[in-house]
Image (cartoon, rainbow, N blue to C red):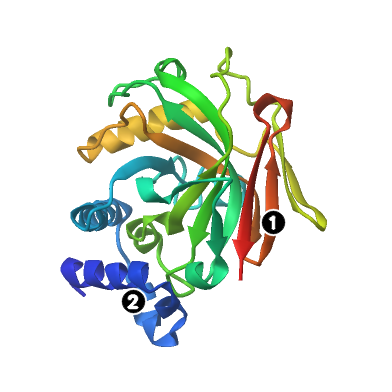
């Protein structure tokens, strides 16, 4: 399958995520793409979104936490893009029927106040952050089971968008998040509680890594971009009202999923 055919198929899946449940798509899922090629295809996918009238709102860095940490290789941290129209607030509700399959994940979201170059360090990243927000990443499972790592990267690492809470001031210390404990729950109670220590890469190191990796692909972290850096608790799509509690440091974020 040629890259333009892969791109066409990914574009169809992004417009029609329900196609990913079709077992005839398994041959597509088994395509063995190098991760770098997957990143290039992902940027071609972003270009299609931009040409259709969308705007780039930010980025994510993947494989930084929990069981997914280093899952594509030691130190491999691929990126994904976030469309501006899909940066939602707590006032918005999302339809499970429209999203199809997937999950919501607690993530820390950073709003940049200035650009980060390809030579960025963790200290540079800390200085570039204008605000920190509690957030959910909304991940949409568009690929059939068994997709190769490179194809998962090409598919934008499953990202559909994010939901953000109220912002706070940037942390004073580069280690401020080490003691963070994040809870995801709903009206029925706590679903999962995850401590930061030992679970996730240092957030500012992740921002610097993301800036350096983007630069290798001709992209830049810019002022105003929203960036998410890795998952804490997560739960599959189901109708209900959910919260992510990031403690006194960052507060809460909420989202309603409708049928």
Q: Can you tell which mark lies on residue 87?
A: none
Left or right of 145 in this view: 49: left
Q: To which residue does mark 2 refer?
A: 28
Q: Residue 202, can we see it? A: no
Left or right of 129 in this view: 51: left
Q: Give residue 147's position: percent from left, percent from top.
A: 42, 69
The earlier-in-sequence mark between 2 and 1 is 2
Q: In this view, does 238 lie above or below 133?
A: below
> Nearer the viewer's eye, disc 2 or disc 1?
1
Q: Residues within 10 Å of mark 1 (few under 14, many from 20)?
A: some
Q: Residue 208, can we see it? A: yes
Which quadrant of the figure contains the C terminus? Answer: bottom right
Q: Give residue 110's position: percent from left, percent from top.
A: 48, 31
- Asked if disc 2 and disc 1 are in contact, CB closer than 8 Å, the reply is no
Which quadrant of the figure contains the N terminus? Answer: bottom left
Q: In this view, does 185 lie above or below 20?
A: above
Q: Is residue 201 above or below residue 10?
A: above
Q: What element carries label 2?
A: helix
Q: Nearer the viewer, residue 213 or 180?
A: 180
* Residue at figure coordinates x 44%, y 55% from the top left: 159
| Residue at far top of view | 172
Q: Which of 196 and 98 is in front in this view?
A: 98
Left or right of 256 in this view: 140: left
Mark pair 2, 1: CA separation = 35 Å
| Residue at far front of view | 91
* Residue at figure coordinates x 68%, y 32% from the top left: 251
Q: Can you tell which mark lies on residue 241?
A: 1
């Amino acid at each position: 399958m040629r890259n333009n055919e892969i791109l066409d198929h990914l574009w169809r899946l992004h417009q029609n995520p329900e196609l990913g449940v079709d077992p005839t798509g398994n041959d597509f899922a088994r395509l063995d793409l190098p991760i770098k090629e997957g990143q290039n295809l992902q940027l071609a996918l972003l270009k299609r979104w931009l040409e259709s009238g969308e705007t780039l709102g930010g980025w994510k860095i993947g494989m930084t936490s929990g069981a997914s940490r280093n899952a594509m290789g030691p130190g491999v941290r691929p990126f994904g893009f976030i469309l501006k129209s899909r940066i939602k607030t707590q006032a918005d509700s999302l339809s499970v029927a429209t999203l199809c399959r997937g999950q919501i994940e607690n993530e820390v979201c950073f709003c940049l106040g200035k650009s980060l170059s390809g030579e960025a360090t963790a200290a540079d990243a800390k200085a570039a952050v204008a605000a920190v927000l509690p957030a959910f990443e909304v991940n949409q499972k568009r690929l059939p089971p068994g997709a190769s790592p490179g194809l998962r990267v090409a598919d934008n690492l499953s990202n559909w968008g994010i939901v953000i809470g109220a912002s706070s001031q940037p942390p004073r210390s580069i280690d401020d998040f080490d003691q963070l404990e994040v809870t995801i729950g709903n009206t029925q109670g706590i679903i999962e509680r995850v401590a930061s220590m030992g679970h996730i890469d240092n957030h500012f190191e992740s921002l610097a890594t993301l800036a350096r990796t983007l630069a290798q692909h001709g992209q830049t972290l810019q002022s105003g971009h929203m960036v998410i850096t890795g998952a804490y608790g997560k739960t599959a799509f189901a109708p209900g009202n959910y919260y992510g509690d990031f403690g006194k440091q960052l507060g809460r974020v909420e989202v309603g999923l409708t049928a």
